[in-house]
Image (cartoon, rainbow, N blue to C red):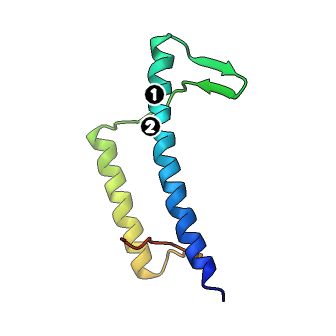
Amino acid sequence: MKKDIFVDYATLDAEIRALELKKAEMKAVIFVELNELDAKTIENPYGKFTIKKNPKVWTYPKKIVGMAEELKLAQVDAQESGEATFTQGESMAFTPSKI
């Protein structure tokens, strides 16, 4: 196995993280500008920028929360007793060195 691939991967990962950070910063600025313009969508030669609604976040009454907790306990019991089954795949993870 070529050792260069590990160096290349680590370098690319660092570059992607830096670009993702820059993208998030730019996205925040664009979001503010769209709100200042009172625009939900702006289209230009580079693409379309749209403010969209995030998924709803629900808050449940105590009765329902209690039922969910009971379900979680029942799930743990089924896992421990062997009644529940599972599948588990594999993937590769990369943790960059702190240089």
Position of residue 29 relative to residue 22, above or below, is above
Q: What residue type is labelled 1?
A: Val
Residue 18 placement, left or right of 72: right
Whether residue 62 is visible here, answered yes or no, is: yes
The residue at which mark 2 appears reads as 25
Q: How far apart are marks 2 and 1 (CA)?
A: 7 Å
Q: Mark 1 packing: few (<14 Cα in 10 Å), some, or many (20+)?
A: few
Residue 58 placement, left or right of 15: left
Residue 14 placement, left or right of 65: right
Whether residue 87 is visible here, answered yes or no, is: no
The residue at which mark 1 appears reads as 29
Q: What residue appears at the point 49 percent right and 55 percent down from the top-left corner?
A: 17
Q: In the structure shown, which secondary structural element does the residue marked by tag 2 occupy? A: helix
Q: Residue 42: which disc?
A: none
Q: Nearer the viewer, residue 74 or 11?
A: 11
Q: What residue appears at the point 40 percent right and 73 percent down from the top-left corner?
A: 97
Give the percent coordinates (x, y) of residue 36.
45, 13
Q: Which amino acid does label 2 sit on?
A: Glu
Q: Are marks 2 and 1 in contact (CB under 8 Å)?
A: yes
Q: Quadrant of the C terminus?
A: bottom left
Position of residue 74 relative to residue 22, above or below, is below
Q: What residue appears at the point 43 percent right and 75 percent down from the top-left corner?
A: 79
Position of residue 73 relative to residue 43, above or below, is below
Q: Nearer the viewer, residue 82 or 37?
A: 37
Give the percent coordinates (x, y) of residue 35.
46, 16
Q: Mark 2 packing: few (<14 Cα in 10 Å), some, or many (20+)?
A: few
Q: In which quarter of the image is the N terminus?
A: bottom right
